[in-house]
Every structure is written in structure tokens, then in C-alpha cells.
């Protein structure tokens, strides 16, 4: 298959009573609709890595993630679609779950490594592929400049200007891309808001600087992690239940649930001026729900 993925990611206005009451307009960029398994920002982050692999005649994609990684699944699926072998180094002891089963279904070779081994990702890569060879190293979560470039295209696609753009952050690659897009298009009146899903989220700023992304229009809201990565609270589940049943838009507890929760909280606290337009990026990743579905029964 040619290396293109035609997709649909509209900007849809969300009509909720709270937004009306506080006189803000909120739109969702539906990157969750890009593809069921090369979901949201994961397609954005893979695109230029895959293009570079094709150009360099590399036939194997090697990447890294935890046992529920959306990025591993996206890489496995993209490999199958675009004709690459895929190898995923998985952090921690051998387990099975629906996400890893889908990775295997798409043909990914899974290699479980200890947490210590996992810290040395480039060593793992070089041990397996001694002389450079035909493999492309893609960092955990698609972190890197290829990923940033792909994510900057989100801004290019926008149909209107926004006062605020919101996005969840894990590695900060998506935020870096948005920041670059905002700067490239000179959107001087747009503030970029990041919601780190890990504790101590200020590190995201460093990760963005390492990618040479501008941070002068960035605000990080570091208090919406609910205890850390994949940590949750009853309040978060309650919010997700309400939100999904009222909007028909699916969110999950790892990333987008925390993101939409944060937005609601900030609107509630009247952080925005009347008539401001807010865009919230739905980064997809709905398989995260599968790891916690029991909380919703
Ligand atoms: C991976 C992922 C993120 C994190 O994106 P970064 O670019 O690593 O910050 C956000 N949302 C979803 C749904 C994801 O799967």
C-alpha cells in the first residue's frame, strides 16, 4: 500500500450546558476518528518515520512500550498496512491482554524485557540489529522530531482560529508539534494548554525544548494527573461516565478522560473570557478503556 492514509478528523462543536452558562465555545478536533488502531496522534507521530523508513529502504520498525501501549498497537497496525515487519519491546514481565493480542494479530513480534533492560532501549536495538541493518528505531510513544513534524500538521488543517488549544501529554511530542504549528502559522493569539497525565508534569517542558519546540505560548496544567500515569479516582470515572453518555464521544481514563476533565474544571473556574473559542484535541487511544472496563460495570 502507498504510504498515505486518507482520513477524516473534523472540528465539531460541543454543546454542553456548562459551556453555554460560561459563554465559551468548545470544539473537538476528532483525531480519534483517524483510524481505530492507528489512533489519533499515533498516526500523526508515525507518518514521517514511515516515510523515512521507505526512503531508506528499511523493512522493519522497532519500537518500545508498556503492555497497554497505544503506540505499540499503532505501529503494529501501520506495519501491516504499509508493508513493514514490526518488533515491539514490551516493558515488564510477559503478560497477555487485548492490546498485546491485537499487536500480535497485526504481526508484531513481541519481546518482553525487564524494566532495567528497558531503560537501555538503544542497547536492545543494537544487540538485535548489529550492523545498522534494515531496521528503524522508533522511540517509545513515537517521541522525536518525525513525530513532532506530523503533529504540527494538526494546526495546518484547522478551519478557524482558536484562543485556546488543549491537548493531553505523555511524552510531549504532540504538544511540541502543536507549538511548532502555532509558531509556523504565527497564531499569536492562541494559547496552547498541555495536560500532563503523569505526576511532576513540568518535565514535559524540557522534553519539548529538547525537540526545539517553542514554549512561549504554552501553559502546562500539572494537577490533573490523578496520582500519576494510569492512576485514577472515582471522580474521574464518574466524569467519564457522564461525559460519554451526554456527548456520544468516547474518552478513556489514561489520557483523554483526564484532558476533558481538566477542561471542564477550568471552564467551571472561569479561566476563560466570554466568547472565547477553545479547541480540544481528541488524541484517540480508546483501547485504554479496555484495561479498566471493570470500573464501569
Ligand atoms: C500516546 C497518547 C498521548 C500522548 O501523546 P504524547 O505525544 O506522547 O504527549 C495522548 N493521548 C492519547 C490518547 C495517546 O494515546
Image: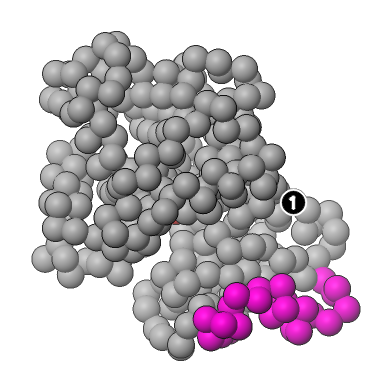
Residue 244 image position (x, y, % from top left) = 20, 45
Which of the 4 image quarters holds residue 233? bottom left
Residue plotted at (72% across, 66% down): 137
State the residue in front, 6 or 189: 189
The crowd level at tag 1 (other Cα within 10 Å; few <14, some 14-19, many 20+) is some
Residue plotted at (66% across, 74% down): 121
Using the rendered image of the protein, determine whether residue 198 is visible from the camera's viewpoint.
yes
Against 296, is 114 above or below? below
How does the figure colour the protein chain or chains? one colour
Which of the 4 image quarters holds residue 288? bottom left
Residue 188 image position (x, y, % from top left) = 55, 15
Left or right: 104, with 153 as reference point: left
Q: Tally the numbered discs.
A: 1
Which of the 4 image quarters holds residue 178? top right
Residue plotted at (49% across, 15% down): 189
* Residue holding disc 1: 51
Q: In the rendered view of the protein, which quadrant contains the C terminus? A: bottom left
- The residues colored magenta run 110-134
Left or right: 101, with 57 as reference point: left
Left or right: 4, with 197 as reference point: right
Residue 124 image position (x, y, % from top left) = 69, 80
Q: Spot the residue most to the top.
A: 275
Using the rendered image of the protein, determine whether residue 40 is visible from the camera's viewpoint.
no
Q: In the rendered view of the protein, which quadrant contains the N terminus? A: bottom right
State the residue in front, 76 or 200: 200
State the residue in front, 216 or 260: 216
Against 76, is 262 above or below? above
| 206 in magenta | no
Residue 280 image position (x, y, % from top left) = 38, 33
Q: Secondary structure at mark 1?
A: helix
Left or right: 1, with 41 as reference point: right
Residue plotted at (56% across, 17% down): 187
Amino acid at each position: 500500500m502507498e504510504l498515505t492514509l486518507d482520513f477524516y478528523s473534523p472540528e465539531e462543536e460541543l454543546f454542553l450546558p456548562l459551556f453555554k452558562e460560561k459563554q465559551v465555545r468548545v470544539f473537538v478536533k476528532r483525531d480519534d476518528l483517524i483510524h481505530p488502531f492507528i489512533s489519533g496522534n499515533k498516526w500523526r507521530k508515525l507518518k514521517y518515520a514511515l516515510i523515512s523508513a521507505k526512503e531508506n529502504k528499511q523493512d522493519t520498525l522497532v519500537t518500545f512500550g508498556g503492555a497497554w501501549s497505544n503506540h505499540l498497537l499503532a505501529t503494529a497496525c501501520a506495519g501491516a498496512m504499509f508493508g513493514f515487519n514490526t518488533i515491539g519491546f514490551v516493558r515488564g514481565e510477559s503478560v497477555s491482554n487485548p492490546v498485546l493480542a491485537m499487536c500480535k494479530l497485526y504481526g508484531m513480534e513481541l519481546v518482553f524485557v525487564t524494566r532495567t533492560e528497558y531503560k537501555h532501549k538503544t542497547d536492545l536495538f543494537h544487540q538485535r540489529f548489529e550492523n545498522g541493518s534494515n531496521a528503524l528505531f522508533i522511540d517509545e510513544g513515537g517521541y522525536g522530531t518525525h513525530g513532532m513534524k506530523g503533529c504540527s500538521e494538526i494546526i495546518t488543517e484547522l478551519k478557524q482560529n482558536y484562543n485556546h488549544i488543549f491537548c493531553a501529554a505523555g511524552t510531549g511530542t504532540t504538544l511540541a508539534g502543536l507549538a511548532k504549528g502555532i509558531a509556523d502559522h504565527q497564531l499569536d493569539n492562541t494559547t496552547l494548554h498541555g495536560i500532563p497525565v503523569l505526576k511532576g508534569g513540568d518535565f514535559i517542558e524540557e522534553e519539548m525544548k529538547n525537540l526545539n519546540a517553542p514554549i512561549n505560548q504554552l501553559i502546562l496544567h500539572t494537577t490533573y494527573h490523578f496520582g500519576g500515569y494510569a492512576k485514577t479516582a472515582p471522580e474521574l470515572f464518574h466524569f467519564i461516565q457522564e461525559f460519554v453518555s451526554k456527548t456520544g464521544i468516547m474518552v478513556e481514563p489514561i489520557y483523554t478522560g483526564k484532558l476533558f476533565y481538566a477542561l471542564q474544571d477550568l471552564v467551571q473556574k472561569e479561566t476563560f473570557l466570554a466568547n472565547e473559542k477553545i479547541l480540544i484535541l481528541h488524541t484517540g487511544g480508546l483501547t485504554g478503556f479496555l484495561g479498566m472496563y471493570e470500573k464501569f460495570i
